[in-house]
Amino acid sequence: MTIEREQLEQDVTSFLRRDPFSVPSYEKNSDFLGIINHLTRHHLLNCASYKRVVEPIFGNLPASALSETPFIPVQLFKTLNLSSVPPGDVIKTMTSSGTTGQVVSKIALDKSTSSGQTRALTQIMKSVLGPTRVPMLIIDTSEVISDRNMFSARGAGIRGFSMFGKDCEYALDKNMNLRIGAIQDFLARHHDETVLLFGFTFMIWQHFCAELNRMDTRFAIPQGVLLHGGGWKKLASLNIGHKEFRNEVERLTGVTNVINYYGMVEQTGSIYIECTEGYLHSSTYSDIVVRNIHNFQPLPVGEEGVIQVISMLPLSYPGHSLLTEDLGVIVGHDDCVCGRIGTYFLVHGRMEDAEIRGCSDSYAS
Amino acid sequence: MAAAIHMHLEDSLPIATVLGNLEIASSQNVWKPFDARVTDYLSQLSRRIFSLPDIHELPGLVSLAYWIRPSAIHRLTQRYDDENYLIGRGMAFHIPPSNVPLNFAYSLFCGLLSGNSNVVRLSSTESIEAITLVELMRIFHREESLHEVSARVCLIRYEHDDSITRALSIKSAARVIWGGNETVRRIRAIETAPRSVDIVFADRVSAALLQSSHVEDLSNDGLLQLVDNFIADGYTFDQNACSSPRLVIWHGTIDSVANASSLFWQQLEQRLKLRETISAAHHMLRFIELCEHLSQHDISRQLVSVVGGATRIKLVEGDDWRDFSKLRFGTFTEVTISNVEEVRHLVSSEVQTLGYFGYKTDEMVQMVKRLSADGIDRVVPIGQALNFDTLWDGYDLIRMLTRTVVII
C-alpha cells in the first residue's frame, strides 16, 4: 500500500470518530474537502476508466469548493466496472436491487472501505437508537438473506442494519405473507423495550400495511422505531406521500417514530436520516450539492435540481461523488429546528424516465 | 401461384397485418409515377391531417402533410418530367428505421409515387404520430373511391425473423432498407429476386457549417432565428436522425469564432430553457452517454464544456471528430477552420448532410464542386436538415424505384 493511500485511510478513520450530527460547517468543511480532493486524486491515479471520464470534463485540479468536486452519474456503475484496487483486494461485490434482466450496479469493496461503511453506519444509527442494540423486527423475508440469488441491495441493507439489532425476527414468510404468530411472540418478548422495525418502504406498504388492513389486525408498538428506505418511486405512483405513509403506519401499529433514510448501494454507510421536521440530514461523513438540471451548475438553498451525493467512504471504487437521478432541494445548513447540524434537504423523487430511443437500427426494433 | 404462396405466408408465419392485405398488395400492376390516383390519395390525406383537431401537437405530421400537399407534389412531378418513360417496378418492400417515427410514411409515399405496390414492416416502437397516420389511412381503406391506391398499401409487423424477410424479399421488385449498418448487412444477406433492386441507407452523420463573422453581425432576431433553426436540426428525435448535425464547423478567425460561438451557445441555452422541450432525464442521458463514451477513449485533457441543454466538445488539430459522432441528446463536437476549403479534411463518406449559415447558395455549389469529397449528399441551410426529399442520401428515390424504358 502506498504512503498516500495509508494517509487517506488514516484521515477517513479519524474523521469517522467525529460525531455524525454535531460538527458545524465551519469546522467540517475544509477537512472534508481535503479528504474528498484526496479521494478524487486517489481514484484518478488508480482507476483508469474514472480518469478517462473525469479529466476531459473536469480537468485534474483539486476542487476549491465542494461544489467543484467532479461527479460521475451513478448509473455508470451499471455499465462500467469501476474499481480502484487490485482484484485480489476485493472482498465482496455489492449489487443494486433489480428485477430479473435489469442491469444492476456492481460495487467492488475492499476491507477498509467495507469497515468504513460499517463504522459510519454505526455512528449514524447510534444517534437514532442509542448506544445499545435493540430487538429488531425485519419487515421482509429471511429468504432475501439466505437465497444467494437475492443477494442484492435489499439483502445487504438488511445485513447491514441487523448489526444494530438483537433477537432479529422476520415479519414475512417466503411468500411475503405476514408471520402473525412470530410477530406476536416477538412483541410479547419485548413489550417494555424500544424495538426497531426495519424494512424497505414499498415492502412495508405492500406486504405489511396492506396485509394488516386485509386481515383487519392492529399491533400496539408505541415504543417502536420504524426505519425505512429504498425510494418512493412505487409509492409516488400510488400517490402515497410521507405523511400518508406515517399516518398509516401509526394507525396500524401505534409506531409514531417513523424515520425515512436516503441512501444508495453506491454509497453504502453514509446514509441520510430524516428528522422530526421531515428533512433528510447529511452526516459529518457526507454532504450533498443540488445542481441545475440544464447546465449542472450548483444551485443555492431553496432551488430544486438534481442531487449530487458526496461521501468520504468509497476508497476501493470511485463513488465518492455521484450525480443521482433524484430531484431535490437543500433547505438549509446547520440550522434545522431538530437540532442536528449539517446540510438538510428534501428529495422530491426520481426524474421521469426518458423514453430512450435506441440507436437508429431497425433490426433491433 | 402467387396467391397460394401468400396465403401460405400469412397463415404459417407470424406476421401481423396492421393495414391492408399482403396477398392483394403483392398482386398489383405497376403504374406510371405520379399517377393521378396516387396524387389524389395523397392530397386528400394531406387535407385530413391538416384538419386533425390536435394537429398543433403533431409537428411531424404537419411536415408530412406539407410534403404531400398538391402544390408540393406538383413541383415534384416537374422534376421527373423528362423524355424518358418511367414505370414502377412492382412490389416495394420497405424496412424503415425506428429512430424517426414517420420515416415509414415517407418511404411508403415514395413507393406509391413511383408507381409501386408497397409492403412496409413497421417498427415495434409506437409513436402517437405514426398511430394517428395509420388510423387515417385505415379510414381511406374503407373508401371505395380510394380503394385502388389502398390496395397498394400493406403495413405489417413481425418479430425479427429472417424466414419472413426472405419470403417477402423473394416477392419484391425493390427493397428499401433503412439503416443502420447492421440491418443493411443482415437484410442484404437475405436472397431476393434476381432483378430486384436494393436501396440501402447506411449509418450517416451530419454537420453544420457557420461563418462566424455572419453570426456576429446578426441582429437579436436574426440570432434567435438561427438558433431555433439549429435546434430544429439538432434536437428533433434526440439528435438520433442521420441528418441531425453532430459536428459544428466554425469558419473564421480565432477571435471571431470565439465571439460568435459564445453568442450562439448562450442564445441556445436561453431558448432551450424557455421551451422546456428537453426533460431532466434527457440531460442526464446526454451526460451518461458522454461518460460511457469517454471511458473508452484516452484523451487526458479537458475538452468538454457543459452549457445549458448542450454539451460542447472542442477539438484541436489532430483530434478526429468521428470519435465523438455517436453522442446524442444535444452533444456537439466543434472545430474551427480559417479557410472553407478545410471542410475537405473533415468530411468522409459517412457525412450525409451539411447545414450551412452565412454563405450564398452559389458559394456552397462552388465549394462542393471543388471538394469532390466522398461524403456530403445534401447541402442545405441550417433548419432544413430534416426536411425530407425524394433526393435523399445521394439517391433519387423516384428514379431508383422506377424502371427507365427507352423507346427510340
Image: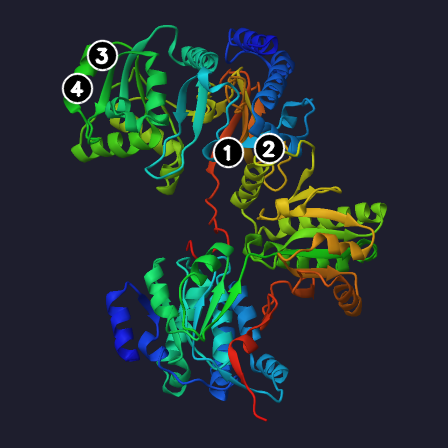
Look at 43% across and 28% down and name the residue there.
A106
Mark 3 closeness class: few <14, some 14–19, many ≥20 residues within 10 Å:
some
Count of numbered circles in the view: 4
The chain holding disc 2 is A
Viewer-closest of A175 and A202: A175
* Mark 3 secondary-structure assignment: loop
The residue mark sitting in front, 3 or 2, is 2
Measured in 3D between alpha carbons, the distance from the residue under mark 1 to the one under mark 3, in whole angstroms, is: 46 Å
Q: Position of residue B120 (x, y in %)?
A: 41, 69
Mark 1 closeness class: few <14, some 14–19, many ≥20 residues within 10 Å:
many
Report the residue marked by disc 3. Answer: A191
Amino acid at the residue labelled 4: Ala
Q: Which mark is residue A53?
A: 2
Look at 37% across and 31% down and name the residue there.
A97
The residue mark sitting in front, 3 or 4, is 4
Q: Is residue B232 above or below residue A69?
A: below
Q: Position of residue B383 (x, y in %)?
A: 66, 62
Are callouts 1 and 3 both on one chain? yes
Report the residue marked by disc 4. Answer: A182
